[in-house]
């Protein structure tokens, strides 16, 4: 069962060197435990572009599509047998990246 | 027949839902099959009479209903379910496994990933067997709202794969605390029902909370906090007959007719508190609250209350729980030993944290009244009345305030 884990932040490019080390260690743990699927950090929300391709010609607009105080600064996709396992793992992930995270299941 | 059905429902519902949920891996299906089995019992038992083994009859019927439903709907993962059905249509239940199923059900319904109100609703429906309209009435929300709340919670359990199991020993204490919080909330909503123009007490909810806590105690007999919460509920429930006057106003502890208290509940509560004391284990929050209530219910007359003992117990509680509400309750006991001035001084530090809490202002009003600061006391009663949500409390506070005005 896969879960999408968003990292919640209210600043951009705010990661520190210590956090990067902790995240690397946590990622190694995910890989060793067979939980790793993918992860990545994201550039600031203002760098995004919204596309509406439903019409005849695609329309491009400057993002983000929703303005909010907090945004998704990065994400993990993890594999875990159930929500309890995912929550236990990502409690460590939240500590490692020093931010709140949101765990959301993929549709099965 | 009705009586047999009611008893069968009380005894069998949680067991049936729990076992069906494990067997078919689907809470929704388990709930509906159990409900259908009881609906069938209402019809069949009236015609054929009550079967010799009502529990067995209900379980077999619920299993059939579940299998019928799966066949009818032939859900997308029907292969997996078909395999389950073929392998053991009526597997023998090893003793103890049934208890584990009910524990699984309780821990799943009280999972911390669910919103508190969803945990409460789900526990009352799946474990308690209350109907959605009953739960909706108890919490003064629309039936459709309550139905959606339960449906959403079940959908999250399925979609996020909240596991159907008893937590690991490492997680068990914290998860048990979570279960007890749900049961205590149900009890309090029954005991101090909120909402204008509603009954001040909803005995259905307090009785249900006690019944569910008894069940958890059977399943987790070694847990001191479970015993503590049960004792706390029993000792509180024992005073219910004396707690609301004929005119609908709350009767405070000191003025209650102690002969109206329920002696059997008090005995049982005291027995549990003594048992926990004898265990020698460090008491948790509920055990301390139960012990405080044991001191109160030990006094045949309010004047005989051992207040120093109450303060000592609150001192222990403060070390576990730094909540300003605990400090407020301690101040009430301090007033009895050291006088209202000392108690009022200790309340000053709590004003910021508790300004929106009616009991803070009600306590201040009573203490100010005792030192004859009448204007301030009246103002505090006004604040308390504006904030109180329980009709009996509001009536009591208004009378106390008006007494001040009259004299």
Image (cartoon, coloured by chain):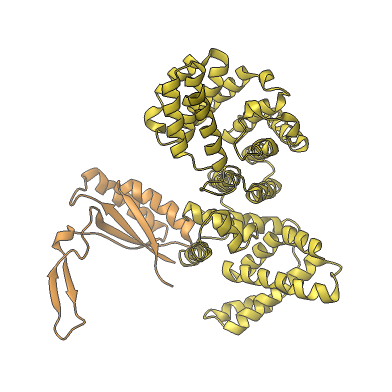
Q: Nearer the viewer, residue B205 or A38?
A: B205
Quarter of the view holding residue B101: bottom right
* Residue B319 in view (yes/no): no
Q: Position of residue B142 (x, y in %)?
A: 51, 62
Which image quarter holds the N terminus of chain A? bottom left
Q: Position of residue A68 (x, y in %)?
A: 23, 56
Quarter of the view holding residue B26: bottom right
What residue do we see at 20% from left, 66% from top? A65
Q: Position of residue B203 (x, y in %)?
A: 66, 48
Residue B120, compared with residue A50, is above or below; it is above
Extreme-bottom residue of the structure? A56
Q: Nearer the viewer, residue B2 or A47?
A: B2
What residue do we see at 44% from left, 39% from top? B387
What residue do we see at 14% from left, 77% from top? A59
Q: Is residue B111 left or right of residue B275?
A: left
Which image quarter holds the C terminus of chain A? bottom left
Q: Nearer the viewer, residue B40 or B23?
A: B40
- Chain shown orange: that is A
Task: Count the labels in the image.
Answer: 0
Q: Is residue B181 left or right of residue B355?
A: right
Q: Position of residue A15 (x, y in %)?
A: 21, 48
Quarter of the view holding residue A71: bottom left
Extreme-top residue of the structure? B338
Q: Is residue B84 left or right of residue B317?
A: right
What residue do we see at 54% from left, 80% from top? B75
Q: Which hue is chain B drawn in?
A: yellow
* Residue B350 in view (yes/no): yes
């Amino acid at each position: 069962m896969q879960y999408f884990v968003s990292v919640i932040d209210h600043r951009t490019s705010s990661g520190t060197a210590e956090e990067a080390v902790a995240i690397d260690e946590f990622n190694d743990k995910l890989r060793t435990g067979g939980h790793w699927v993918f992860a990545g950090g994201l550039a600031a929300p203002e760098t995004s572009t919204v596309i509406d391709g439903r019409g005849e010609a695609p329309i491009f607009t400057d993002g983000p599509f929703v303005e909010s105080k907090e945004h998704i600064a990065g994400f993990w996709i993890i594999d875990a047998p159930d929500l309890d396992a995912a929550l236990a793992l990502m409690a460590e992930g939240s500590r490692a990246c020093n931010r709140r995270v949101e765990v959301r299941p993929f549709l099965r | 027949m009705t009586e047999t059905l009611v008893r069968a429902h009380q005894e069998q519902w949680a067991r049936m839902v729990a076992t069906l949920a494990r067997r078919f891996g689907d809470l929704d299906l388990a709930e509906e099959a159990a409900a259908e089995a009881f609906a069938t019992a209402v019809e069949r038992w009236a015609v054929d009479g009550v079967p010799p083994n009502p529990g067995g009859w209900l379980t077999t019927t619920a299993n059939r209903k579940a299998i019928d439903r799966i066949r009818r709907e032939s859900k997308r993962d029907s292969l997996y379910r078909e395999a389950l059905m073929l392998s053991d249509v009526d597997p023998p239940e090893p003793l103890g496994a049934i208890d584990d199923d009910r524990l699984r059900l309780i821990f799943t319904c009280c999972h911390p990933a669910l919103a508190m109100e969803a945990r409460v609703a789900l526990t009352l429906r799946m474990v308690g067997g209350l109907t959605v309209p009953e739960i909706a009435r108890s919490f003064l929300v629309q039936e459709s709202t309550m139905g959606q709340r339960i449906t959403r919670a079940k959908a999250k359990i399925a979609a996020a794969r909240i596991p159907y199991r008893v937590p690991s020993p490492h997680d068990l204490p914290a998860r048990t605390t979570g279960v007890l919080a749900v049961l205590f909330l149900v009890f309090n909503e029954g005991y101090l029902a909120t909402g204008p123009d509603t009954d001040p007490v909803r005995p259905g909810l307090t009785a249900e909370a006690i019944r569910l806590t008894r069940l958890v105690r059977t399943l987790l007999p070694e847990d001191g906090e479970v015993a503590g919460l049960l004792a706390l509920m029993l000792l509180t429930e024992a005073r219910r007959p004396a707690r609301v006057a004929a005119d609908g106003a709350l009767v405070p502890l000191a003025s209650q007719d102690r002969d109206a208290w329920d002696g059997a509940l008090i005995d049982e509560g005291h027995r549990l508190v003594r048992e926990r004391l004898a265990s020698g284990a460090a008491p948790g929050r509920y055990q301390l609250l139960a012990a405080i209530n044991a001191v109160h219910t030990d006094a045949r007359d309010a004047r005989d209350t051992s207040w120093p003992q109450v303060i000592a117990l609150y001192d222990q509680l403060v070390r576990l729980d730094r909540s300003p509400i605990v400090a407020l309750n301690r101040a009430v006991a301090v007033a009895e030993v050291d006088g209202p001035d000392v108690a009022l001084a200790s309340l000053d530090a709590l004003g910021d944290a508790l300004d929106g809490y009616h009991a803070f202002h009600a306590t201040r009003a009573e203490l100010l009244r005792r030192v004859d600061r009448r204007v301030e006391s009246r103002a505090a009663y006004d604040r308390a009345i504006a904030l109180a949500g329980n009709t009996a409390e509001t009536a009591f506070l208004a009378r106390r305030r008006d007494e001040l005005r009259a004299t």
